Amino acid sequence: MKKIAVDAMGGDYAPQAIVEGVNQALADFSDIEVQLYGDESKIKQYLTATERVSIIHTDEKINSDDEPTKAIRKKKNASMVLAAKAVKDGEADAVLSAGNTGALLAAGFFIVGRIKNIDRPGLMSTLPTTDGKGFDMLDLGANAENTAHHLHQYAILGSFYARNVRGIEKPRVGLLNNGTESSKGDPLRKEAYDLLVADESLNFVGNVEARDLMDGVADVVVTDGFTGNAVLKAIEGTAMGIMGLLKNAIVGGGLRAKLGAFLLKDNLRGLKKQLNYSDVGGAVLFGVKAPVVKTHGSSDAKAVYSTIRQIRTMLETDVVAQTAREFSEE
Amino acid sequence: MKKIAVDAMGGDYAPQAIVEGVNQALADFSDIEVQLYGDESKIKQYLTATERVSIIHTDEKINSDDEPTKAIRKKKNASMVLAAKAVKDGEADAVLSAGNTGALLAAGFFIVGRIKNIDRPGLMSTLPTTDGKGFDMLDLGANAENTAHHLHQYAILGSFYARNVRGIEKPRVGLLNNGTESSKGDPLRKEAYDLLVADESLNFVGNVEARDLMDGVADVVVTDGFTGNAVLKAIEGTAMGIMGLLKNAIVGGGLRAKLGAFLLKDNLRGLKKQLNYSDVGGAVLFGVKAPVVKTHGSSDAKAVYSTIRQIRTMLETDVVAQTAREFSEE
């Protein structure tokens, strides 16, 4: 039985979206057990599942504007903190939250704990490509600074994930850079390039540019946390901006445009689905001793469900434990 | 008379697109004179303008895959090099090319020359926002590394441009960062934040995130060249990817979808126009002694025309000379 500790109080639509996602996941996956941390009476309003689920009541929770490290230290009974502690104490195998990202990273670092020999755990997500296959990028902002050695570790971590969880036999690893030539970039990129090209266990395909990410130029893309965060947000912002413009063009476009949009409805919905991150699960803090997974603050029940499915696959393939063994042997 | 030196041989559709853009600009603007550098017989095939235009013939040109600095040094008679030299020698006031970006940057640095006290010229573009106003971002990749002092200079340069060329009285300056709180970022960002907040001549609005750029969160956004390059390319790649998906959804969507798309045609064209960089001109290498402007390699005649219009405004408002005076007094 895979035990998943869920912070029921994090995110814009908590606890409803969280609990509804859990209901669905418990119905579909008979090999998981969910522990819901949070306000019992509120959780009960939405909880329809009756088996393999428990509620651990707490009044305390971390808010989206709390200072992360301080919140983790001071709010010892916050739902997120208790969920992370359950993993640390061996009562759960993984933790899921839609709450304050910084606090969840801090809970991952300080409560769940780093894997031996992994210096800087990185935040990783599977982002959409036009062919629907997606790519994994890390670090998306767990760190503000990284060394070339960290980037090398991210390549190994990302490859592990792509192979085990996404079933890609030889994941193509790309180094995000300001040009594709091997000589490109700042000293960090040049040093990382040398480390990646020398590691024969990786399928390193060289430097990749942000322009080509959505075309699926690599299965795993490594970068420092500052750049990764900026690129992720640029992708999100542009996608949201264009979809908004498209909507305005239709809404403000008169009867003819509205009829056109009606006829195109299914196709536009398909497009939105292709761009929707909620289908592929949440962002994984990779490099800590158990799956610590952040789903978007605006996650609906479906996104929560997808993230539980992702966590289940991570536990089934034992990707974190394998990673830990690999790095401990170094 | 404003004299513009144009590299007629750079870009994917040279010389046709370049010369046709020049024809149109000469017809619309009676106060400009254009010098076309390149293959005379090829240029003549497309040149319809007869006044205020001259051809300076050369057989040599820089290719898109030439190593920039080496190309500038060795190909002394390349069309781009001759255009830059014309500016240096006072025969022209500005240079325009759609060719090899790195080579044009090198020509700007080494031939046109830096403004006194500006350490690292930065590449700046006006990028689209959903409200149609746009924002200026720099450095977009003239440098692989920058200091906080450079970022401060970019804020001054960008504000100058936004005020003089775009007519924004008090341009809002944002520092691209991994969060909006003042304490965010790596040491570079923290140091830059302190410099920006202390400079009372700037309308500094604090840290901005890449997610909010398209919403017009600032008029001028400053960042280091590595991050700026990655964010620019992420925006371009996402916009192209989504427009491609939209097209596929329609083309692959059967009769109903095609009819819908037909009815929405004008609206979709409007959307494309809003996202089109070619309307706002090219990327300016800011911090050198004259306007050195790069228009996209895939520029059509219209993009070339818009870039000439932009250069004309830059010359009319004397923004570069003003910048030079400002910095020389430091």
Image (tube, coloured by chain):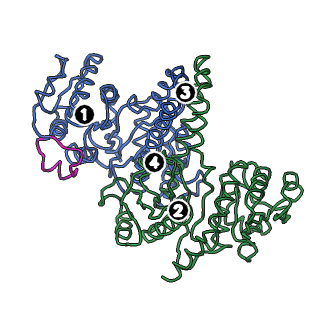
Chain colours: A blue, B green
Q: Nearer the viewer, mark 1 or mark 3?
A: 3
Q: What's drawn in magenta, residue-wise?
A: A61-77
Residue placed most toward the observer, B188 or B304: B304
> Label 1 neighbourhood size at 10 Å, few (<14), some (14-19), many (20+)?
many
Which amino acid type is marked by label 2?
Answer: Gly
Q: Which mark is residue A257?
A: 3
Q: Residues within 10 Å of mark 2 (few under 14, many from 20)?
A: few
Regarding mark 2 in the picture, which secondary structure is present there?
Answer: loop
Towards the viewer: A106 or B286: B286
Mark 2 and mark 3 residues within 8 Å of each other at the beta carbon: no
Pointers 3 and 4 within a single chain: yes
Task: Mark 1 or mark 4: name the one nearer the start of the chain.
Answer: 1
Does A63 lie within the magenta span? yes
Q: Position of residue A24 (x, y in %)?
A: 28, 19
Q: How far apart are labels 1 and 3 at the CA level?
A: 48 Å
Give the structural element (helix, strand or loop) at label 4: helix
| Same-subunit check for callouts 2 and 3 | no
Viewer-nearest of labels 2 and 1?
2
Residue B243 horizontal side relative to residue A107, left or right: right
Residue under label 1, please give it: A94
Q: Residue at x 32, y 52 (%)?
A: A119
Q: Amino acid at mark 1?
A: Ala
* Above or below B126: residue A289: above
Residue that label 2 marks: B167
In the image, what residue type sits under mark 4?
Val
* Dot label at residue A231: 4
Q: What's the residue type where badge 3 is placed?
A: Ala
CA gap, disc 3 and disc 4: 33 Å
